[in-house]
Image (spheres, rainbow, N blue to C red):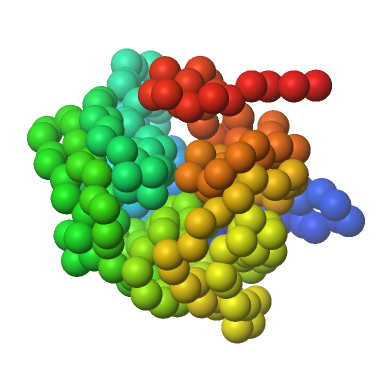
Amino acid sequence: MEGFAALGAEIKVDGRFYHLKARRLKGAEYFFTTVTVTGTEAMIMAACLAQGKTVLKNCALEPEISALADYLNGCGAKIKGANSPTIIIEGVSKLSGGQFTIMPDRIETGTFAILAAAARAPLTITKCQPAHIESLLAIFKKIGISYETGPDWLKIKPANKFKSYNIKTHEYPGFPTDLQASFAVLMTQANGTSMIHETIYDRRLLYADMLTQMNANIIMCDPHRLVVSGPTGLCGKKLTSPDLRAGIAMIIAALVARGETEIDNIYQIDRGYENICERLNKLGADIQRVD
């Protein structure tokens, strides 16, 4: 809202509604006090058709932002610096249509990589961009999980033993908050003690209690930090997915665990991982959907 106001929009807050209006937005200089992905993307889109030049500072660096800028530039926008903290947009009078290929989902790539490592199973992930998950792969190298990469593929090799590792979530290119829950599951199988520190979102460690029910050795330090000790043998339980990323972590834990696990509230998992049951079953999993 502050960014839109800086571009000249009139903003009115009315209960649960935001009312925004402007005859035409005008270019401005705006500094993000908090690094924000969707905030950066929203301001880029708004500035494309604003009159004059817009300079955005302290922008997020996620590759999705560069992909959005590439698409908009292909439609006639004038955006520079989309892979840097400062982005400059020269407003244009109109945009045309265009064609674009959606980039691979880096979070899904990282999730499958963690699944393979936790299950100690070989897995080749295709149609991905390993460079987008370098923070995870760097940790894999440190803890003893071997892998190979190509331009658009990643191969995870099974490791009988691997070490624990502390993580602290951070904006890209740091460790992604969206891989934090899955990494905690991986650490239940690691040798040693690791700390998981969530710095991006509140209430993102709600899954810890469910992993504890599955026999994980987890101590909750505070709402943002937990300590995982491993390796521990997980066992199947009846669980409820608290959110999208914790939900996929529950699936990884269930595949590693002995016995049967039932996971409720799975619509959130489907939202982020298309045809997840069918794809995992092709890898040898035994997953069924039940009403």
Q: In which quadrant of the rendered image does the C terminus lie?
A: top right
Q: Position of residue 280 (x, y in %)?
A: 46, 26
Q: Position of residue 247 (x, y in %)?
A: 61, 44
For image coordinates 48% across by 45% down, the residue present is 256
Q: In which quadrant of the rendered image does the N terminus lie?
A: bottom right
Quarter occupied by residue 48: top left
Taking depth in this image into account, of 106 and 285 the one nearest to the observer is 285
Tell me: 214 left or right of 48.
right
For residue 273, say whether it is visible.
yes
For image coordinates 25% across by 35% down, the residue present is 122
Taking depth in this image into account, of 127 and 46 the one nearest to the observer is 127
Taking depth in this image into account, of 161 and 30 the one nearest to the observer is 161
Quarter occupied by residue 22: top right
For image coordinates 63% across by 82% down, the residue present is 222
* Farthest-out residue, bottom: 221
For image coordinates 48% across by 27% down, the residue present is 285
